[in-house]
Amino acid sequence: MPNDLQRDLSQKSRLQTLSILVFIVAIITIAAMTYVQTILVPGFVEIAVRTWASLGGLIAVPLFLTLGFRDWLITSRAKLPAWRNGLALSSMVLSSLVWLSHISMSVVSAGPLPINHFPHVDSLDLIATLLGSNLLAGLLAIALTGKARLLVLSAVILLWAGLESGIYF
């Protein structure tokens, strides 16, 4: 019995460390993306950073949101008051919708020209709206606690970097 408790505690500490590492990688990604957009760097470096941010924004975001939702549901949902649960769930839903909009925008823009007129919105305005909504999702994610907060904030930061990777000056 004590061995099971010790193994469970070591697994929880490993998952907490992994969540912190994921958050640090997300911060480094957004910092590298901002650096590439503001400072003149060699072309291969810019392409590598933009590709990394784009793939992180497309692939890692749903994984981190799912893990964050699962952790919130299992560990902290019952402990938090209703208003904090509402804010936490809103942050996860909003960031999921921003991710889905980003995916659909990428699919539509990759299609043939007649289909490309679907949004009837300036793409820069649409990206600005998605970035603003993503910022709101990040602010709402502060209502989460523990690993869920780190995972959802990591997803929001990676989604921000993924959206920024499509902006060229």
Image (cartoon, grey):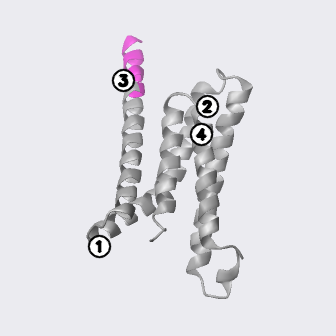
Q: Which mark is residue 139?
A: 4
CA separation, marks 2 and 3? 26 Å
Nearest-to-viewer mark from 2 and 3: 2
Reading the image, the residue beneath label 3 is 10
Majority secondary structure of the magenta segment?
Answer: helix
Q: Nearer the viewer, residue 51 or 32?
A: 32
CA separation, marks 3 and 1? 44 Å
Q: Magenta segment range?
A: 1-12
CA separation, marks 4 and 1? 34 Å
- Name which residue lies at 35% across and 55% down: 32
Tag 3: amino acid:
Ser
Q: Which mark is residue 43?
A: 1
Q: Secondary structure at mark 4?
A: helix
**Does label 4 or label 3 sit earlier along the sequence?**
3
Nearest-to-viewer mark from 2 and 4: 4
**Does label 3 or label 1 sit earlier along the sequence?**
3
Q: Residues within 10 Å of mark 2 (few under 14, many from 20)?
A: some
Q: Which mark is residue 143?
A: 2
Q: Secondary structure at mark 1?
A: helix
Q: Secondary structure at mark 3?
A: helix
Q: Is residue 121 part of the magenta span, yes or no?
A: no
- Percent across and percent down for residue 145 are 55, 28
Residue 16 in sight from this viewpoint: yes
